[in-house]
Image (cartoon, helix red, strand yellow):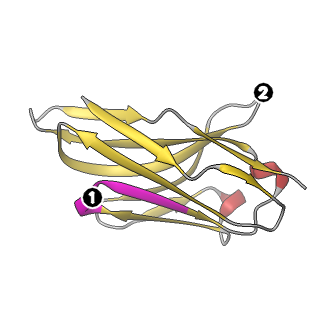
Amino acid sequence: QVQLVESGGGLVQPGGSLRLSCAASGSIRRTITMGWYRQAPGKQRELVAAITSGGSTNYADSVKGRFTISRDTAKNTVYLQMNSLKPEDTAVYYCNADGISTTRDWFASWGQGTQVTVSS
């Protein structure tokens, strides 16, 4: 069992910043990819940013230049620094992680989600 716990969401004005954190715990041998997805009301869940264990990153075009993903591999934690936030960034943000468990099985887990609201 692998659990992901997110924190850092909230209400922010347009142009403001927020930092999301997600800590993975449980039967983890190694995390491979950690990332953030978001889902706005009435829309499909979409990838925001992801980072591999080697440090390669991938961003949605809509957040490039504004959001930065990073990770602390030793702590199995991933961060999302969000700057210059826009109302269209409003969504529930979900953490995702995949990798190898202590039983050498593949795992892919989701966090419970954290609300980000950008509004004046």
Q: Residue at x 68, y 61 (%)?
A: 63
Q: Residue at x 9, y 32 (%)?
A: 103
Instruction: Give the residue at mark 2.
Output: 42
Quadrant where the C terminus lies? bottom right
> Looking at the picture, which amino acid does disc 1 mark?
Lys
Marks 1 and 2 in Cβ contact (< 8 Å) = no
**Quarter of the image holding residue 84?**
bottom right
What separation in Å lies between label 1 and label 2 (alpha carbons)? 34 Å
What range is drawn magenta here?
Answer: 73-80
User: Disc 1 on helix, strand or loop?
Assistant: helix
Q: Is residue 6 depicted above or below 56 in this figure?
A: above
Q: Is residue 97 depicted above or below 120 in this figure?
A: above
Query: What residue occupies the far right of the structure in this picture?
Result: 120
> Looking at the picture, which amino acid does disc 2 mark?
Gly
Query: What residue occupies the far left of the structure in this picture?
Result: 103
Instruction: Give the residue at mark 1.
Output: 75
The picture places residue 116, in percent across and down from the top left corner, at 69, 47
The picture places residue 56, in percent across and down from the top left corner, at 39, 66
Q: 10 Å neighbourhood of mark 1: few (<14), some, or many (≥20)?
A: few
Q: Is residue 30 depicted above or below 85 in this figure?
A: above
Foreground disc of the pair 1, 2: 1
**Quarter of the image holding residue 68?**
bottom right
Q: Residue at x 27, y 42 (%)?
A: 25
The picture places residue 98, in percent across and down from the top left corner, at 32, 41
**In screen coordinates, is 62 left or right of 35?**
right
Q: Is residue 54 depicted above or below 107 in this figure?
A: below
The picture places residue 83, in percent across and down from the top left corner, at 69, 68
**In screen coordinates, is 27 left or right of 35?**
left
Quadrant where the N terminus lies? top left
N-term mark: 1 or 2: 2
